[in-house]
Image (spheres, grey):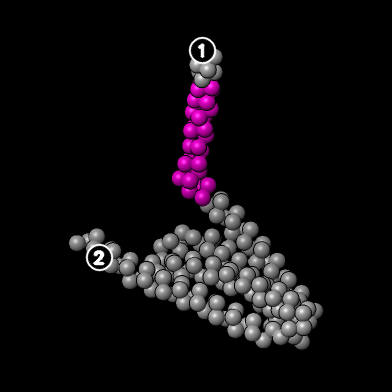
Amino acid sequence: MYREAMRRTVVGPSAVVSYGLKDASSWWERVNESIVWQDRIFHILAGLYGIVAVVALVQLIRIQLRVPEYGWTTQKVFHFLNFFINGVRSLVFIFRRDIQKLQPEILQHILLDMPSLLFFTTYALLVLFWAEIYYQARAVSTDGLRPYFFAINGVVYAIQVKILVHNSISIPAKENNLCL
């Protein structure tokens, strides 16, 4: 009898809570379907990526002014790639409606995937930078690190190109099958 009374009291409030949660989740559907909200969110993201791009560019300029004699060091390339990636992502968020209309569709995939690939390269470069510091601290030659960096990046880019080629061949084939 005590358990049954407890079960009734637990079921009652939990049903009310779950009903409230169900109603609370509908706000996301309204936001997700609202063009105004989408524009606001994407413009905020574009602004944030733009800020990160400007900070990376300022840092690159500061390093270049401080030590111009070293040329393109790992650190300078890292900041340049950060500037480029975040700048492209900012532009993608600003012009996303135009990008969604690009034809052939493979151009959309290339434009949307390229910043992610460069992001991978950027942070692989960061790992290379720290590996060089570690090896130099132990008085070990760093000559073998860069070939590994290029090989790993080459494999990742080759896989991405293979996926893009596969998608560019299979997407038109699917569209043609739907028309039959």
Under mark 2, the amino acid is Asn
For disc 2, the marked residue is: 176
- The disc at residue 1 is 1
Image coords of residue 39 (percent x, y): 52, 52
Q: Which mark is residue 135?
A: none
Q: Amino acid at mark 1?
A: Met
Q: Percent from the top left, x then y, of residue 75?
A: 70, 76
Look at 55% across and 77% down and name the residue there: 152
Q: Position of residue 170 (x, y in %)?
A: 32, 68
Describe residue 87's horizontal placement relative to residue 179 as left or right: right
Residue ID at (73%, 71%): 59
Segment tinted magenta in the rendering:
9-38
Q: Is 20 inside the magenta-drawn segment? A: yes
**Helix, strand or loop status at disc 1:** loop
Tell me, yes or no, if residue 99 can be seen here.
yes
Q: Does 176 appear in magenta?
A: no
> Is disc 2 placed on a helix, strand or loop?
helix
| First along the sequence among labels 1 and 2 | 1
Q: Main secondary structure of the magenta part?
A: helix
**Which x, y percent locates residue 125?**
64, 75
Compared across the picture, whether 178 is left or right of 136 comes to left
